[in-house]
Amino acid sequence: MLVTVRGIVVSLKDTGENDRILKIITEDLGVISIYARGVRKLNGKNSSAAQLFAYARFCLNESGDRYYLESSETICVFYDLRSDLKRLALASYLADVVKYAVMAGQPSSETMQLLLNSLSFLSEGTRSCELLKSVFEFRFACCTGHMPRLMGCDECYAYEAEEMYFAFDEGRLYCGDHISCCGSDHIRVSPVVLHTIRYICLSEFKKIFYFDLKGKSLSELSIISERYLLGVLHHEQGFGTLDFYRSMLE
Ligand SMILES: [Zn+2]
């Protein structure tokens, strides 16, 4: 049976003489594995779509529980990502998160769009890596069923008290008067960063990349988004690609 999907390549593994097994994220089928024959040949007909981060239309032959690549039409390969090691490292981490956390068969329209927009901004190089990373981390958590509880303090519902704390367990908030009720790891969150977290998680999708944050506030956001996402994914030890990206910042 032939199926056509739009997808982004999030990992690849060379196999045989000229073949590759690709993992792609699609809107309707989640992350699936595709067997792609002959794509490592120079000028192979599907070579362009069989690269990491390629965004393409894939025509697949579904046979048993496997997909075989029949033909493809490349939409974008984000070539400029390769010109900057830091941006490339961050893109690799985002792809790793998707590969790790999105299952086959899981509808993933917003998740795919999130990765697509992140790769697009990274490729353009017009936005800060740390900002893109935090937007991706918080919104990815929301897309995969881990929306933080941002309405207010978990005890008294205060939306914005003088002191506010973000608890990593389920993303609860506590005010200064009720932080003693918090049973998990937590961190004090400044008003501007709390506002930003709400903006990323609760805004319409098309707005989430359009704000700016710098300096200490961006560092604060970055610590919270990374730790929250790794926590909800139960991947506290982190990803190798994340370690590599971090090493680029030093
Ligand atoms: Zn409270």
Image: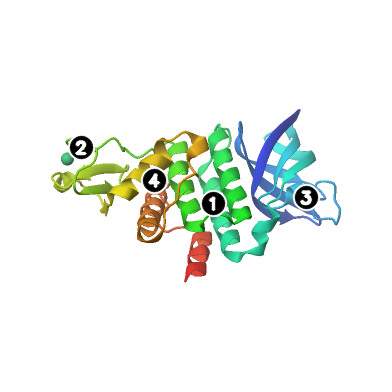
Instruction: Say what amino acid the circle numbered 4 marks.
Output: Val
Tell me whether circle 2 and circle 4 mark residues in contact (CB < 8 Å). no
Instruction: Describe the element under mark 3 as helix, strand or loop.
Output: helix
Which corner quadrant of the image does residue 72 belong to? Answer: top right
Please name the residue that numbered disc 2 is placed on.
158
Please name the residue that numbered disc 4 is placed on.
232
Marked residue nearer the N-terminal end (1 or 4): 1
What residue occupies the far top of the structure in this picture?
A: 1
Quarter holding ligand 1: top left
Which corner quadrant of the image does residue 154 belong to? Answer: top left
Residue at position x 42%, y 59% from top? 237
Instruction: Describe the element under mark 4 as helix, strand or loop.
Output: helix
- Specify whether 79 is left or right of 218: right
Please name the residue that numbered disc 1 is placed on.
94
Residue at position x 85%, y 46% from top? 45
Please name the residue that numbered disc 3 is placed on.
48
Residue at mark 2: C-beta within 8 A of ligand 1: yes
Figure coloring: rainbow
Which corner quadrant of the image does residue 75 belong to? Answer: top right
Marked residue nearer the N-terminal end (3 or 1): 3
The answer to whether residue 144 shows anywhere in this view is no
Instruction: Say what amino acid the circle numbered 2 marks.
Output: Ala
Q: CA distance from mark 1 to mark 4?
A: 15 Å
Q: Is residue 77 above or below residue 32?
A: below
